[in-house]
Amino acid sequence: LLKGKFNTLESESAVVLRSLAKGGGVPPYSVDPELLLWDKEIYYSSEQRKTLKARLTNVMAGKQEYARKLRDHLRRAVLASRLEREVGGAEDGDRLDDAALASIAIGTNGQDVYTQTLRTISESTFVTVLVDCSGSMGSILSPSSRSAKAAVCASELHEGMRGARIPHAILGYHCVYRSGKGEGVDWARYDQELRHHVFVEAPGFASDAGDALGAITGKERNCDCESVLWAARYTAQWGAKADRLILIVISDGLPTGSRHGATYLERAVEQVVGAGIEVYGIGIEFYAETIWEEFQKFYPNRNEEPGRAASGCLRVPSEGLGDMVVRELTKLLTRGYGMSRRAVRS
């Protein structure tokens, strides 16, 4: 995937994620192997979705205005992008790419030599939203909780992308304590089992309207680095044919499920953007200004560079989603084509 760049991300949860081991005096990221047997991916049945629908409806009461605004913003952006562009460096197409003629002549390129018509943004972009479901997010049953605000944000993103026909998925993560693990061993994750939730399955156009988003609520702790890598693998799998891949992480701050969690999260994000997936953090109501400062280190505001996709962060104020946030979210999704796997020329 992604012309081989994504093979630096482990194909599944590994005992040692060696790529997170460099520098800073922090040891390689390691996991007690027995914990891997207890890690789980959680999907929601149609019956569970029926139960969760009422909870989501209560959370969304009075918030539909921003879902409509986000959807309208995205639709206009998609329509504005539907101009035909010439895409070079393709393996097949209607005609030879003029820019590749010289490399063909000297025998250095015999495969990626055709041009195609660029697909619309709704077809060439895949977006994954990853929601922090750790205990500090609070209960979704409280309208003022971070979980409730995250559920509103995720639901509005879902409705906006669904209305604009942008393929996407919405995932969640937390971890639970397992007693008696890791004693006497310096594992990075030694007593926490991962719980990864699939609230809205790719490609995001299901008829259930995202009812499982009602399951977003705070539980125990969070192991962000492994969860970000898991979401990145999901994104690469489902967005394998897309030119632009985006991962949006909604969280209220710091990892708590492993030793040296902040350092490993920073490295995990850099690993993902290095694989060509744009990563953006959405911060929900931080406990302190210092946590926001730390959050910006995890998701630094950096434009696309050679060998690195764009990254950035956005802060949702205490009053929740508003016009400014909707505009900024739309910019994240429509700012360009990121680190595309193909060369695009107007």
Image: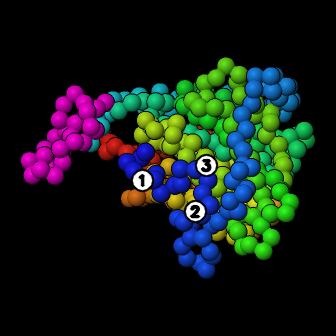
- Which corner quadrant of the image does residue 262 belong to? bottom right
Give me the residue at 19% from left, 31% from top. 95
Q: Specify whether 37 is left or right of 233.
A: right
Rendered view: 241 above or below 335: above
Mark 1 element type: helix
Work out whether residue 212 or residue 309 is closer to the camera in this orientation and state it. Answer: 212
What crowding class fits label 1: few (fewer than 14 Cα within 10 Å), some (14-19), or many (20 or more)?
Answer: some
Q: Specify whether 319 is left or right of 200.
A: right
Q: Specify whether 8 is left or right of 325.
A: left
How far apart in space, not on screen, are marks 2 and 1 (Cα)?
A: 16 Å
Quick check: can you spot residue 283? no
Q: Earlier in the sequence, mark 2 or mark 3?
A: 2
Give me the residue at 46% from left, 51% from top. 6
- Residue type, mark 1 in image: Lys
Q: Position of residue 124 (x, y in %)?
A: 44, 34
Give me the residue at 51% from left, 40% from top. 237
Q: Which mark is residue 5?
A: 1
Quick check: can you spot residue 41? yes
Q: Which residue is mark 3?
A: 230
Q: Quadrant of the C terminus?
A: top left
Q: Earlier in the sequence, mark 1 or mark 3?
A: 1
How far apart in space, not on screen, are marks 1 and 3 (Cα)?
A: 16 Å
In the image, the segment drawn in magenta is 90-117
Specify the farthest residue to the bottom: 25
Mark 2 element type: strand
Q: Which mark is residue 17?
A: 2
Give me the residue at 35% from left, 32% from top. 118
Rendered view: 243 above or below 279: above
- Residue type, mark 3 in image: Trp
- Which corner quadrant of the image does residue 205 belong to? top right
Mark 3 element type: helix
